[in-house]
Image (tube, rainbow, N blue to C red):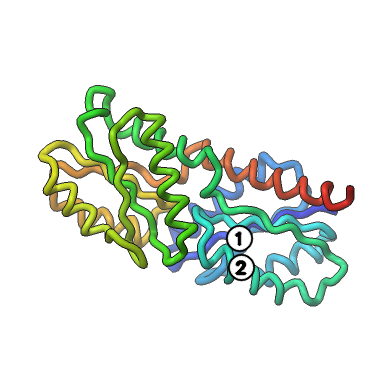
Amino acid sequence: MKGVLYISHGSRVASARHDAVHYIERVKARVDVPLQEVCFLELAEPTIKQGIQRLVERGATDIAVMPVFLLEARHAKKDVPELLEAAMKPYPHVRIQYGKPLGGHHGMSQLVVERILESISSDELLHTTYILVGRGSSDPDALATLNSIANEAKERLGVPCIHQCYLAAATPTFKEGIAGALESTNGPILVIPYLMFSGTLLHEIDEYIGEWQQLRRTEPLNGHPQLEAVLEQRVQETLEQFEEAVM
């Protein structure tokens, strides 16, 4: 019997955990699989080990494991696989397929476009400076993915540039990105958090940009139907791998 395990990052902020579970519950309703569980990489329960255990106890023999992360960095490449390997040791009869994070899906650049268009008028489109703010990573693949998303969104919108900066672990930093934009224009600046949920990072952004009237930000990515559609497609892709493995 097939099952799906959704792995969210986890947070100490209760509202962020609630948003993550609520988002995944909406996706679960779109996926025609009887056994589905939500777990967290860290900072919250159920853990990955507990999520696997629940699915196996409910009768799952094929489990699609979905890393619900925006980019393919250390968590998706190393931390989750290591925890998953340990969690699967008691269940050698159970097959798993490991899915892809959301980031490389073409729908993510469209989601960035939608968030931008919600936040400005058509008259402002070509007169606004755009800054896409990522969480940040030392992984070059994660940075390349964010760059690709920015370029695709730029092409879709027909604007000259979408700048990028990072809250941690990469440059330019968030504050450097804001400073550069303020030096280059007196016009409106739109900050686009490439963050899934509200939480401490979004609060950090809001505290900083509140000092300047010309700075505005879009909503985080959660709450948009496109985000649900992307994860649903990732789940279907991963489930199909079980059929391909049999052929």
Which residue appears at 59% of the width and 43% of the height?
26
Q: Which mark is residue 174?
A: none
What whole-number distance in Å separates the C-alpha atoms at marks 1 and 2?
8 Å
29 relative position to 23: left or right: right
57 relative position to 124: left or right: right
Which residue is identified by label 1? 7
81 relative position to 246: left or right: left
Query: What percent of the width, then of the height, locates residue 66?
Result: 64, 55
Give the position of the N terminus as an image quadrant. Answer: bottom right
Q: What residue type is labelled 2?
A: Val
Query: What percent of the width, then of the height, locates residue 81?
Result: 65, 68
Residues at badges 1 and 2 in contact (C-beta under 8 Å)?
A: yes
Quadrant in the picture for residue 176: bottom left
Q: Earlier in the sequence, mark 1 or mark 2?
A: 1
Query: What percent of the width, then of the height, locates residue 70?
Result: 50, 53
Foreground tag (1 vs 2) = 2
Please, is residue 58 above or below residue 132 in the view?
below
Quadrant in the picture for residue 49: bottom right
Q: Element type at marker 2?
A: helix
Please, is residue 71 above or below residue 42 in the view?
above
Which residue appears at 30% of the width and 58% of the height?
203
Q: Element type at marker 1?
A: strand
The count of marks equals 2
Which residue is identified by label 2? 80
Please, is residue 48 above or below residue 65 in the view?
below
139 relative position to 183: left or right: right
**Whether residue 200 can be seen here:** yes
* Crowd tier of the residue under label 1, counting other residues whose Cα lies within 10 Å: few below 14, some 14–19, many 20 or above: many
Query: What percent of the width, then of the height, locates residue 59?
Result: 84, 60
Q: Which amino acid does label 1 sit on?
A: Ile
